[in-house]
Image (cartoon, coloured by chain):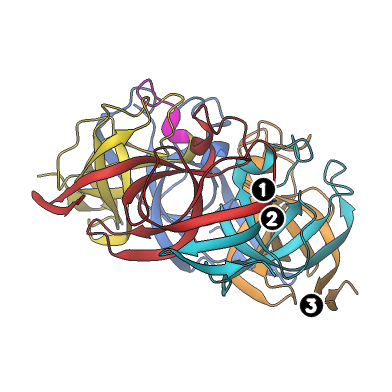
Chain colours: A cyan, B orange, C blue, D red, E yellow
Amino acid sequence: MLIARVVGTAISTIKDEKVQGRKLLVLKQTDPTGKLIGKPFVAVDLVDAGEGELVLTGHGSSARQTNLTKDCPVDAVVVAVIDHLNVDDKVVFRKE
Amino acid sequence: MLIARVVGTAISTIKDEKVQGRKLLVLKQTDPTGKLIGKPFVAVDLVDAGEGELVLTGHGSSARQTNLTKDCPVDAVVVAVIDHLNVDDKVVFRKE
Amino acid sequence: MLIARVVGTAISTIKDEKVQGRKLLVLKQTDPTGKLIGKPFVAVDLVDAGEGELVLTGHGSSARQTNLTKDCPVDAVVVAVIDHLNVDDKVVFRKE
Amino acid sequence: MLIARVVGTAISTIKDEKVQGRKLLVLKQTDPTGKLIGKPFVAVDLVDAGEGELVLTGHGSSARQTNLTKDCPVDAVVVAVIDHLNVDDKVVFRKE
Amino acid sequence: MLIARVVGTAISTIKDEKVQGRKLLVLKQTDPTGKLIGKPFVAVDLVDAGEGELVLTGHGSSARQTNLTKDCPVDAVVVAVIDHLNVDDKVVFRKE
């Protein structure tokens, strides 16, 4: 999974019916301190994550292992909101 | 999924029979404002996307979770035309 | 899928029996004009592609969705020979 | 699989129920000498790896081939703690 | 598949039982002439490849399509030892 920050939302007018109604978030990967790294991607929100929050994202076929995304043509889901991250026994990120 | 722009079409003369007849689009990943980033790829069009439009693409085995692509040797599909993208509570892209 | 050019062939003496006898091509990804980009990879040829030709390649589990590659430990196949590619309503590549 | 070093842990408050209770490690890929390379990722710990240890990680659908992760939306697991790595007939890494 | 060179071996003390006993090789991707490119990875050896040899590796779910790796949390296997590679009608690599 990746550590990623919710940076926005995507609204689409034409969709595969199985994806219809799913909340789509725009995310960017971060390092453990929350610093943005890498390119943006879009994932189905499973945990009602808010904009700006740090989350864990699951990718590939793993993204279909949930009731909401089973058999859907989606390849990324937000599986958890991160509470805190520890690196070298220090808390490097904590949810406000 | 990725945010991508349709930049062209691919026409091929010899094809696996299961892929035959599918419209193949040439795409490039974009950032949420629509700026092109990354290398080109080819995806099966599921939503009749037009050239220049911003779309969402599904990759890997997720690309086979549709009636049109089931059991096909394709690894990317266009699943939605993007209407608008919000980042930091601002609309950074809107379909014309 | 990727746009790629056939740059060579790979001959191997020891192989998983399910892959044995398959023609293995060495490819490099190209942009829509046929310019080489990215690192080389090897794919099973499904369409009798010739050296120098521009082809479409399918990757990951999608590469096993054909009679020739079913249940094989291969992760890339050549699914089509490209006839021409259109970008911005211009033909940017045409097979000779 | 990748050679990676455990650099920390991730604690999340909201989780898909199938992932709940799993220990999530923050890792970075390393070269065979243990030097950090590449971006961080998060994996489910299967082997009770300690912070600082060098481990092997399995990715994608392979990460679900264990009793702890079957049918879970996770795409990376720690499958082994590395004891030592040999390159050019020399031991380039040994667990302390 | 990738062209890769066997650069070493990985020995691990704690392993998922399904992976236990498998020979794990450390590899680096190469170009068709055998020049090292890219980051190291670890794969299960299916063909008794020797250190220094050029091999073909299969990745992702394709790595589980063999008797030795079925249902195992491994994402890379060595499927063949390369005998020779032809590029532009010239032999650019030949096994010694």
Check the residue under mark 3 and report the chain it is in.
B
Q: Nearer the viewer, residue C87 or B28?
A: B28
Residue B1's disc is 2
The answer to whether tags 3 and 1 share a subunit is no
Q: Quadrant of residue A48?
A: bottom right
- The amino acid beneath tag 2 is Met
Alpha-carbon span between mark 2 and mark 3: 20 Å
Alpha-carbon span between mark 1 and mark 2: 6 Å
Magenta-highlighted residues: E62-69
Position of A84 relative to B61 (above/below): below
Between circles 3 and 1, the one closer to the viewer is 3
Residue A43 point in image, percent of width and height: 72, 55
Dominant secondary structure, magenta: loop
Q: Nearer the viewer, residue B20 or A53?
A: A53
Check the residue under mark 2 and report the chain it is in.
B
The residue identified by callout 3 is B88
Whether residue A95 appears in magenta in the rendering, the answer is no
- The amino acid beneath tag 1 is Asp
Position of A4 relative to E14 (above/below): below
Q: Is residue C91 left or right of residue E62?
A: right
Q: Secondary structure at mark 3?
A: loop
* Tag 1 and tag 2, C-beta contact below 8 Å: yes
- The amino acid beneath tag 3 is Asp
The answer to whether tags 1 and 2 share a subunit is no
Q: Residues within 10 Å of mark 1 (few under 14, many from 20)?
A: many
